Image: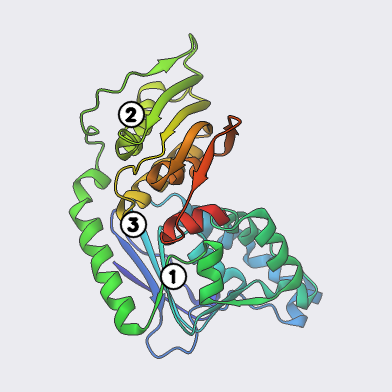
Amino acid sequence: HTVFVPTSLSDLEPDWPDNALLVFRGVEGAEHFCLGGDPSQANLESGSFLDGLPAFGNLLERLRDAPMPKVVVCHGATRGGGMLFPCLGTAVLAHSDATFGFPEIRRGALPGVVSVAARRRLSPAACEWLFCTGDAIDAATAQRLGLVDFVGSWEELDAELARLERHFVSSAPRLLGPSPLPASEVTIEADADSRVARLEVTAASVGGLWRDALLVLDKLSPSLRVLVLCVEGQGGPSDSLSREACHRLDAAMSRLSEAGVVVVCCVRGQVEGLLLHACLGAHYRIVEAGAAFSFDGESECTRAAAFH
């Protein structure tokens, strides 16, 4: 289902279906994707800009809690409240002319509700820089910071969007219903209260970590609070570091975070490939002396995870 986002959020009608792959893109012919609300000096001085905050908060919750993937296609400028869409997107595509920013500070305000969403994709350091300076960043910088997943021409964006639609539609039975996870032989180790669980992860098993992590969540929720990943690298290549493998792992980590589970990664040996990506997705990393991380710089997904 395609949602055409108006340049001004005040014109948005959030009437999209819940059980559909959502594609958010700018109105055809519009110069920009979305510039947020009305940050005029008169609205700031009168305080009338606060009148729209409840609706904006509801929009954030609707996007955050959407049960299906959200693909966001940005072009031109995306600013202020309009940043809600890329910050909460499952996959964010940007035209090479796209720019992004939080200009509120230059109008005497600070980002409000949108600042909560921004932390889903941007690191604390990036948030502080963008919130406190009001600087705009181009698409390449946004990709480097992890806000954007793919940058290209209109032709390239259309091709990537078509690929993502095929991928998500093929996954629809799994996404739509509580179908059982693929069979796994993983042994779940947990404490007596099922609050802390432990998984062994190697180069040979990391390809199924997304499934094993969700299995742990499924079995131990809602008591689970900490998942410890004991990662041991052997210095050899792990499963293929494909974009799909990275996204699957990232989605599993997001599910754990949304459930309030902290992921702690204990690292030994030489870690690379998908194993490294798994380590970067954890909230905390405890590294044994002598352990090493190896990255050839080729994977955009892992590079984005590193900047997170």
Q: Quadrant of the N terminus?
A: bottom left
Measure the C-alpha gap from mark 3 to mark 2.
22 Å
Q: Is residue 255 left or right of residue 264?
A: left
Q: Residue at image x 77%, y 77%?
A: 106
Image coordinates of residue 119 in percent, x first then y, are 60, 54
Q: Is residue 299 left or right of residue 173?
A: right
Residue linked to disc 3? 243
Kindly identify the amino acid type of the residue bearing the numbered disc 3: Arg
Q: Is residue 67 visible?
A: no
Q: Is residue 31 visible?
A: yes
- Please tell me in which quadrant of the rendered image residue 252 appears: top left
Which circle's residue, 1 or 2, is located before the other in the chain? 1
Q: Residue at image x 49%, y 58%?
A: 303
Q: Which mark is residue 215?
A: 2
Element type at mark 3: helix
Q: Residues within 10 Å of mark 3 (few under 14, many from 20)?
A: few
Residue linked to disc 1? 13
Measure the C-alpha gap from mark 1 to mark 2.
37 Å
Image coordinates of residue 49 in percent, x first then y, are 69, 71
- Please tell me in which quadrant of the rendered image residue 276 appears: top left
Measure the C-alpha gap from mark 3 to mark 1.
33 Å
Give the residue furthest to the top: 192
Q: With respect to residue 288, does 168 lie above or below?
A: below
Kindly identify the amino acid type of the residue bearing the numbered disc 2: Leu
Counting labels gives 3
Kindly identify the amino acid type of the residue bearing the numbered disc 1: Glu
Q: Residues within 10 Å of mark 2 (few under 14, many from 20)?
A: some
Which circle's residue, 3 or 2, is located before the other in the chain? 2
Which circle's residue, 3 or 1, is located before the other in the chain? 1
